[in-house]
Image: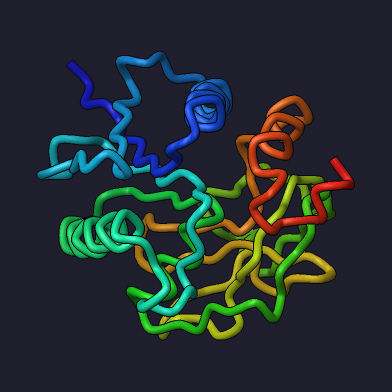
Amino acid sequence: MTRPLCFLASRAEPAAADAEYASVLAFTGLAPEQLVRVRLETGEEPGDLTRYAGVILGGSPFTASTPEADKTAVQTGVEAVLMDVLDQVVAHRIPFLGLCYGIGVVGRWAGGLVDGTYAEDTDAVTITLTDAGREDPLLVGMPASFEAYVGHKEACTQLPPGAVVLARSAACPVQMYRFAPGAYVTQFHPEMDAEAVQLRIEVYAHAGYFPPEEV
């Protein structure tokens, strides 16, 4: 039997958590038994990642660049697990894709700088591949520019050592990068469609991404 992929989630809000998982299933074309969801915010841990064919890290209401003293115990616990996840990913060359929150987590782990300089409001923006992106095996066949949804309080201001920028947008110079063989993070959300964005807006109306009266 082919090994499943592992989906690492950290959203406590049921509607957002389930919708995100459904979006990733639809985006990848996988069945639920092929994408094992691990709810990190509940204290669940993925364990030995070599059991999986790859790892996808979902988005999160957490902001990785929040000062450590201001993080909740749940966020601190989630990010401690993710540090181990990234150690395993690189040590065993496990394919990895981190969506949005992955930029912050990987930036912390790998020695980059993540802050609010290039934050973007919730919107559909044009993503443009770099020369390296057009040559990357994961992106072969992708158009040079495409539309995708964004919405984030932090972004990569300085790449981790050895990372390669693969995509950018007008307002955010690092929309995707590769940080190890077969290991990627995106700032944009490749998995989201308009319906998913609308639900996310409703769930996080008071989370500081935009004025709640705009919902």
Judging depth in this view, the residue of 126 and 21 nearest the camera is 21
Q: Is residue 208 left or right of residue 171?
A: left
Q: Is residue 87 left or right of residue 64?
A: left
Q: Quadrant of the C terminus?
A: top right
Quarter-of-image position of residue 167: bottom right
Judging depth in this view, the residue of 17 and 167 nearest the camera is 17
Q: Is residue 164 left or right of residue 48?
A: right
Residue 126 image position (x, y, % from top left): 84, 54
Q: Residue furthest right?
A: 214
Rendered position, 135 above or below 123: below
Residue 200 image position (x, y, % from top left): 67, 36
Judging depth in this view, the residue of 109 and 215 nearest the camera is 215
Judging depth in this view, the residue of 139 and 171 nearest the camera is 171
Residue 64 image position (x, y, % from top left): 45, 68
Q: Quadrant of the N terminus?
A: top left
Q: Residue furthest left?
A: 48
Quarter-of-image position of residue 177: bottom right
Rendered position, 5 above or below 152: above
Query: Which residue is found at the position 56% from the left and 55% from the top?
Result: 100
Q: Is residue 147 left or right of residue 50?
A: right
Query: Which residue is found at the position 50% from the left and 58% from the top?
Result: 185
Query: Which residue is found at the position 32% from the left and 20% from the top?
Result: 34
**According to the image, what is the colour scheme of the structure?**
rainbow
For the image, the number of numbered tags is 0
Rendered position, 184 above or below 31: below
Residue 51 image position (x, y, % from top left): 14, 36
Quarter-of-image position of residue 15: top right
